[in-house]
């Protein structure tokens, strides 16, 4: 690199030597300490598994961005919290719906007069 190149630019250029996906993940982690989840709300909870998978994949690149595991865990929890906070009713209904489907068999509702 040129001797007059700023050190932060040199860091990014070194990240370019990683695989394409790893370089992108590292640059996102370096520049976005608090990832904005709100644009994903338009797809409701469909993106939640993708975000979780991306964060799990990003965990393996922490050494390249000098970030501790504890700081990264806080970042993960923050992203998941934003999903639940941004769509509380969907989160609760989805959780309740899953639990009740697993526990209660499907049956017809009966009127009180029919049971007497």
Image (cartoon, rainbow, N blue to C red):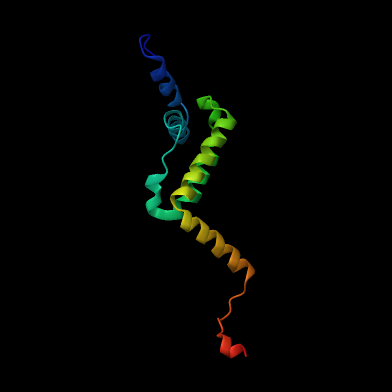
- Horizontal and vertical percent position of residue 90: 47, 58
- Residue depicted at 54% across the width and 64% down the height: 97
- Residue depicted at 57% across the width and 36% down the height: 73
- Horizontal and vertical percent position of residue 16: 42, 26
Of 75 and 28, nearer the camera is: 75
Q: Is residue 47 visible in this depiction of the protein?
A: yes
Which residue appears farthest toward the top when viewing the image?
3
Is 53 rendered above or below residue 10? below
Is 15 rendered above or below residue 110? above
State left or right for residue 42 relative to residue 71: left
Of 73 and 24, nearer the camera is: 73
Q: Quadrant of residue 106?
A: bottom right
Is 67 rendered above or below residue 3? below
- Residue depicted at 60% across the width and 63% down the height: 99
- Horizontal and vertical percent position of residue 114: 58, 90
Count how many numbered circles sit on residues in the image.
0
Q: Quadrant of residue 96?
A: bottom right
Q: Is residue 60 visible in this depiction of the protein?
A: no
Query: Which image quarter holds the C terminus?
Result: bottom right
State left or right for residue 113 relative to residue 50: right
Of 25 and 72, nearer the camera is: 72
Query: Which image quarter holds the N terminus?
Result: top left
Of 60 and 31, nearer the camera is: 31
State left or right for residue 106 relative to residue 22: right
- Residue depicted at 57% across the width and 28% down the height: 68
- Horizontal and vertical percent position of residue 36: 41, 40
């Amino acid at each position: 690199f040129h001797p007059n190149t700023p050190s932060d630019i040199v860091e990014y250029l070194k990240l370019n030597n990683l695989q394409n996906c790893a370089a992108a993940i590292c640059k996102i982690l370096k520049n976005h300490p608090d990832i904005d989840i709100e644009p994903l709300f338009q797809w409701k909870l469909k993106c939640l598994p993708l975000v979780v998978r991306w964060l799990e994949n990003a965990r393996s690149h922490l050494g390249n961005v000098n970030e501790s595991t504890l700081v990264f865990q806080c970042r993960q929890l923050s992203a998941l919290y934003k999903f639940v906070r941004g769509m509380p009713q969907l989160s609760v209904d989805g959780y309740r719906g899953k639990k009740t489907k697993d526990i209660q068999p499907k049956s017809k509702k009966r009127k009180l007069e029919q049971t007497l």
